[in-house]
Each structure stands twice: as structure tokens, then as C-alpha cells.
Amino acid sequence: MFPRIKILNRDTVFVLIIFLVTCALLRMPDIYTSPYAREEERYVGQVLAADDSLVKQYGIVKSGTQKLQVRLLDGPYAGQDVSAGNVLIGKMESDKMFRPGDMVFVIVTTTGGEITAATAYDHYRLHVEGLLLILFAMILIGFAGWSGAKALLALFFTVVTMWKVLLPGILMGHDPIWTALLAVTAIAGVTLFSIAGVSRTALVAWAGALLGVSLTAALAIFLFPPFRLHGAIQPYAETLLYSGFDNLNLERLFIAAVFLGASGAVIDLSIDVSAAMSEVSRKRPDLSVKELIKSGLSVGRPMAATMVTTLMMAYMSEYMALLMVLFSKGIPPVQVVNLNYISAEVLKTVVGSFGLITVAPFTALVGGYVYVRWRSTDETRSPH
């Protein structure tokens, strides 16, 4: 007798497909290549000595050039000591100072196989980031098991999709709103069907999340003009224009950022409501569509209320320093709220909250019909 071969269930097959798709995206050639990219070699080095004699202090900022002696630790020049510069431009948010023993990223220029110039670009943090991610993965898998592993895969897919598809697609000239909507659709589908399995629960949550995100996008498009804002209100948006992307529509990019930022919370709320309705439907198969929808709404109301606060805190935390500056100057709250930076965050928070508030009833409506109607279909098809 041959041993029985266990056939993989559809959930495992789906996870394997997503894993292969993610690997394919990683291996896929970049769809956008910057015309401003320079042929540079980057290596990891360790600072042996630092000379601050050319660095000038002006109040709390510094400017000038820090001279470093750096030993390269990887690449074809591993073990070689080079002189590297660290140019300070007087901006604390971008300047950095190095000390002996620091690990740094070094950009080198070579001619004929010899290093002719080197620049200390930034502190090397990848080893710390890698250890942190490994620790996070171990704790998540240790706590959630196979579900945690699937959550990590969904997170990895999200990062790869944004890095390889969303951002390059917008830089290529594709409409930011439609590109972001397609990305959110894929990310929501992969996340929900990975975590909840290929099931009605995931399908209902996916439909509810997409309806909530679509409403958020529509409201952002409608409310953006009355706020009299411009897309350059986003950090580094003006830098993006000066980098050769003057044809990029920053207003639509801002709108895309509004519903993209709220999409994570929308997906979270939709699966909570859908899972609760699925359990109620399974325990109480006698419930009608209307009664099941009421149950979904009862579950979604307190979740939506707390999610709104979460969204507001996440958005406003980006401008804590600005808010503190404004309040330290004695500027009235009415004027603070009216500032373009704060108004932009108000728009993000309120419009994103509309998506959170409506995703619960959207999911409840879809779930009520799907769970009850499909249950009736299953009962009709089952043999007596």
C-alpha cells in the first residue's frame, strides 16, 4: 500500500502563492529607474578617528566638514583605511556627527580600481534594525503561531508592494489616487485572506474595507478644494518637485496619502466585525439578515469609536514639535487649527474617520447578506 499523501488545503495554497508572488516582486526588475542615479559604491566602515577642527558651532547647530579616518569592513576594499568627509549644512534634522568606533555607511568614488574620494553618508543601522525585526518575528510567531507567520508574510507583501509597485508607479506618472487604490485593494486582500483564510469571513471583510476606503477617497477628493490646501503641504513634496517631477500632481498625491493612511485601521475594523458576525451566524443559524446586521453594527460601534481616537493620535503626533512651538508663542487655538499644516492633519483625521465609521455598517450589510444567503444555499444543497 502506498502511503496517503495529504493534500494541502486552500488556505495553505493561498499562502504559498502569496509567498511566491512576493518573491517574484522582489526579483522583478525595477519598473522605474531614476535618471539622476549616480554610479556610487556603498560600503560599511568603522570610524577610527575624527577631526572636528573644521566644524564651526553656531548656537545649537554646526556647519563645516568633519574629517574622518574610516576602515572599510565589506566589499572589495575590506580592511582598507580611507579618509572620508562629513559635510554639515547647519540642519539638525539631517546633519550627523561621528565618533571613533561608530559604524557608518561610506560612499566611495573609484578610478581605475583605486579609491579617490569617500563620504561618510550616515550611521549604519541595518544590523540593529535586522535584530529588532528578528526579535519581533520570533515574539509574533511564538505568540500567534501559524497565524503570526501569515501576518508577517502579509506585512512583507505590503512593504514590497509599496516599494516595488506603488511608489515607482506614481513616479512614472500614473495617477496617485488610482495607483494607491489598486495597491490598497491588493494589500487588503492579501492581509485578510492570509489571516482569516480563504473564507467568507475574509471576503466580507475585504468588501467592507474596500467600500470604506473608496468612501474615504471620494470624501477626500470632494473636501480637498474647500480647505484651500496644496499638495506641497506634505513633507519633502517641494523637494520632489525640484528633483525633476514638476509634472507630478501633488494634490492627488495628498489625497492618496489620506486614504492610504487610514486603510490599515479600516482593514483592522472590517475583519473584527466580519469575524464576530461569522461566529454569531454559526452559533445562531436562525438569525435573519436584519438581525445579523444589527449584531454586526453592535460590534462595530465601540470599535469605530476607539479607532477614531487612534487615527487622530497617529496623525497629530507627526506635528508635536510644531504644536509645541505654536503654543509656546501664545498663538490662540483658533489660529493654530486654521494653519495649513494643522488643517491638513484635520482633513486627514476627519476624512479617515469617515472611513472608519462607515466600514462597520458596510461590513455588517455585506456580512448580513453573505452569511445568511450563503447559509441558505448550503442548506439547500446539502442532502437530507
Image (cartoon, rainbow, N blue to C red):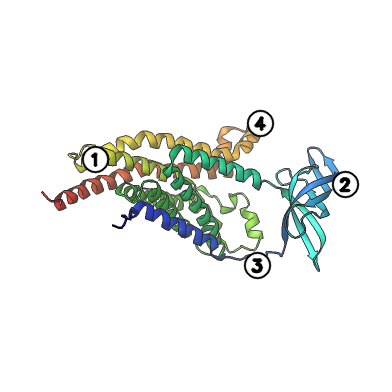
Q: Amino acid at mark 4?
A: Ser
Outermost residue, right side: 53
Residue 192 pos. (x, y %): 39, 48
* Label 3 – label 2 distance at C-alpha: 34 Å
Q: Which residue is mark 1?
A: 282
Mark 2 against mark 1, which lies toward the viewer?
A: 1
Toward the viewer: 231 or 258?
Answer: 258
| Mark sitting earlier along the chain (4/2) | 2
| Residue 289 in the figure: left or right of residue 80 | left
- The numbered disc on residue 35 is 3
Real-space Cα distance between discs 1 and 4?
57 Å
Q: Indicate left or right for 43 with 200 as reference.
A: right
Label 4 sits on residue: 328
Task: Judge whether residue 176 can be spotted in this image.
Answer: no
Q: Is residue 268 left or right of residue 159?
A: left
Provide the secondary structure element on which disc 3 rests: loop
Cα gap from disc 3 to disc 1, whole angstroms:
57 Å
| Amino acid type, residue under disc 3 in the picture | Pro
Distance from Cα at disc 4 to Cα at disc 2? 35 Å
